[in-house]
Image (cartoon, coloured by chain):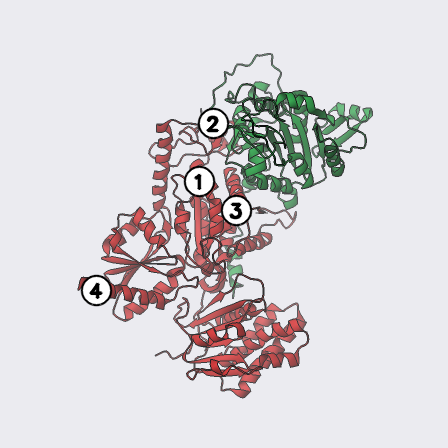
Amino acid sequence: MRSGINDFAFKLASVNGTGSASSSILLMQAIFRMGVPVSGKNLFPSNIQGLPTWYEIRVNKDGYTARAPQYDLMVAMNAQTYARDVAEVRSGGYLVYDSTWPLDPDLFRDDVTFIGVPLARLCNENFQGARERILVKNIACAGVLIALLNIDEEIVEQLLDEKFSKKKALRDSNTKALQLGRNFVRENYSCPLPFHLEKMDGNKDKMLIDGNSMAALGAIYAGATVAAWYPITPATSVMDNFKSYADKFRKDKETGESNFIFIQAEDELAAIGMVIGASWNGARSFTSTSGPGISLMNELLGLAYYAEIPAVIVDVQRVGPSTGMPTRTQQGDILECAYASHGDTKHILLFAANPSECFDFTVRAFDLAEQFQTPVFMLSDLDIGMNDWVTPKVKWDDNYRPNRGLVLTAEQLEAMPKFHRYLPEEGTNVPARTLPGIHPNGAFFTRGSGHNKYGGYTEVPAEYQEVMDRLLLKHKEAAKSVPPAEIVKRPGATVGIISLGGCDPAVREAADIASKEGNPTDYMRIRAFPFGEEVEKFLADHEYCFIVEQNRDAQLRTLLLLETNVAKEKLRSVLNYSGFPLSARTVLDAIAAQVEELDAVNR
Amino acid sequence: MPSIVKPRVAHPSLKRNDVGLTVRDYEGQMSTLCAGCGHDSITAGITRALWELSIPPHMIAKMSGIGCSSKTPTYFVNGAHGFNSAHGRMPAIATGANAANKELTYVGVSGDGDSLSIGLGHLCHAIRRNLKMLYVIENNGVYGLTKGQFSASADVGTKSKKGEVNLMAPIDPVMLALSIGATFVARSFSGDKEQLVPILKAALSHRGLALVDVISPCVTFNDHEGSTRSYIYTRQHLHEATESNFVPPAREIVAEIARQGGTNVTMHDGSVIHFSRVPDNYDVSDRKAAMDYIREHPAEVVTGILYADESVPEMHEMNKTPSTALAHLPYEKLCPGSAILDKLQASYR
């Protein structure tokens, strides 16, 4: 049985646009600074103001960060969703509600302790102005949680000092609101609750950051100078952050000049076009987008693939198809990215599972794109990209230099009798390229139309095929350069779990639980496409494998079936495509159900 | 696109430009367009203009989309880099290319299908960004490669080769560009080299995006009776609103022109457009006057440099990029290093 100390979850139900997210983030930060591993999920609507929004916070001393399996405490501040929120509390749990108004007796539950706090009344009595009253209510609510969950007050004070260092009036009203909530519960209820926080040392060398910030930082460190994009949830903060880091780190202090250019394009067609134009001209260039943007980019991704031009695309996946649910998470772009564009195309994909990998993989995406002269997708998702995670700090090697791939210098071109764009050295698959303006001998005509290995226009079957065949070999060759799958083996395991990206925290937790229950499984987290030899081996070594992913159509499973030798019946799917992040419970239940089914068949 | 290699024999007495090259050095492959195509005359005009301006061929980037017009970059300046991209996307790709390397001269060649239909949005936004480039629209009112469909520039009442009459209002690239803040707008006729070459030279010297709409009859699909883009129709309705000459920077002739009077526009690089004829009440720096003038002559093909404004910053100036091309910045200038990363990460708590 859980002790509940540093191991519980709570959920705040509120209305968006009222400042609820910032008070939730304040709580997250305070818990993080107490040294307690914590994870938060902002489950928000695609709307500016007035619709239901939730923020879940899970505290787990062992560092499990997947979505909480159940809620010990619900803070139900939204009358619209009240019935739903009451129903979600675990039996024996607690619920905080605004007791300014009487609660509908139908919504009481015998197995839940109700904590009434007259937040609206307290705020109305102590603050002026409708907007302020609404905003401070969330802070007063944070005060309630400080008392109930034993959140360190000194740390909260410090956070407020940092946040409002230049806004004294706001600092004062926040303190006042915090105290109103805190004092009321202390005077009327027994605090803290049985489950609560105690300081520990669980966050050493870690930080609290979202994946989009880290992807942006990766682009800065990789040396990207041309950023082109079109705003889209949930990828917008990649570029917002890139801009603010670039303004900070890429501006010449003396001249005020910017060592980067930031272009908000007219659409995603243009955004990828700009990336391709800039990369063709030798700049490191990238775009960030989500599924609908990838759909639009398909046309020019084929051009970049066929004309062999580097491009980096950060795809923060959201729920599709069509507009889908823009503020909900999914892994629905796997196949779309793998084979983006008409005709025969195959791309390099990197699947980040956390903010640290968003950084590393973005840097690697630039190297791979230039090494293989082709588009590279760095895929994350809304959950990784927009939520704050306790994540290891990344290390930067100051000896790192970009891998620019085969680019001929003026001296090399001078010594060259004739340059042929698509003619690689014997036994290799990547030809050298030239950059415009470097040397007269390097000039050539880039085209998306049929071309032969010399770069000339062709409609001759054999000449066309020769180039296409080499492109396939080039893609295969990339398997040796992409991040290998991460494999965790357990003694006695015969079954494998295969997953990718944002499923990782839930799958790891599920595998640990299964192992403790006597059902050890091996785990392979795929981190890139094309698949390396280790993927083929893992598939061969296991009787059967469960593929855990967040989409309806089992896209990773399909990709494995298409691109490895694995037999179809070996791969069984565990799918979650609700739009909410995966929990370990979902994984375990789905696997248990399938094992039962398999056993029944075998019996 | 298919192309035929042109024999390259230059007569020793051919004139050389400032970088020691003859006009033959600015030629490309043999054209594979239909004999008599207006586009080939424009190709000749571009060849001439680039040679006269002495731009080293390898410092030229030829950008195009898809269509008959977009094939033509193969037919000029063999020694330049070319990028024949995707239908309508040339402005986007040119924007990225220009963003990465401001040191090159960008020559974009597009058509009315490429720029006024599939790529209309990209054209508009390239104009708004005012990236420094020559943007030529080879405007024939018709889709040639797909055999004769109307384009968005076809006039109301114009007849297709099959006898169909267009009933939809055309998009006029000149009026469009003027209405969204273009900083250099000109129109010419492929059959008038005397006018076209100086316009192209002025456009190439413009501070930002220079849009040159060139009426270019399609001999195969749009040169018949009832067409408003035929040679005959265009010649009959041609109306040269402004007459101008282009004077390169730092030449004595500049002073001479100043003495002569007339209207001059001094370009950002010091060169001058000398207008020897501008209608009364028409000011080439007055956007409204230009639009009014075109509206007042609905039945005519109004040509010349119709509007020029050298005061608007181009894309790099707006973005305050350094004088070195972004693509040439050393990595050391771009990476903030481990100490800054450590400090930054420590703040995320």
Q: Which residue is mark 1?
A: A302
Please tell me if label 4 and label 1 are on a single chain.
yes
The correct choice, above or below, for A545 with respect to A510 in the image is above
Q: Which residue is mark 2?
A: B1
Chain assigned green: B
Q: Disc 4 to disc 1, how far (Cα)?
A: 46 Å
Q: Position of residue A262 (x, y in %)?
A: 58, 48
Residue B152 horizontal side relative to residue A455, left or right: right
Tag 2–tag 4 contact (CB < 8 Å): no
Return the disc, 1 or 3, that comes first in the chain's sequence. Answer: 3
Tag 1–tag 3 contact (CB < 8 Å): no
Locate the N terminus of chain A by quadrant: bottom left
Splitting the image into 4 quarters, where does residue A510 fall? bottom left
Splitting the image into 4 quarters, where does residue B231 fall? top right
Nearest the eye: B183 or A249 = B183
Q: Disc 2 to disc 4, how far (Cα)?
A: 62 Å
Residue drawn at point x = 66 percent, y = 47 percent:
A255
User: Is residue A364 visible in the rendered structure shown here?
Assistant: no
Given the image, what chain letter belongs to the residue carrying mark 4? A
Which amino acid lies under the numbered mark 1 shown in the image of this protein? Gly
Q: What crowding class fits label 4: few (fewer than 14 Cα within 10 Å), some (14-19), or many (20 or more)?
A: few
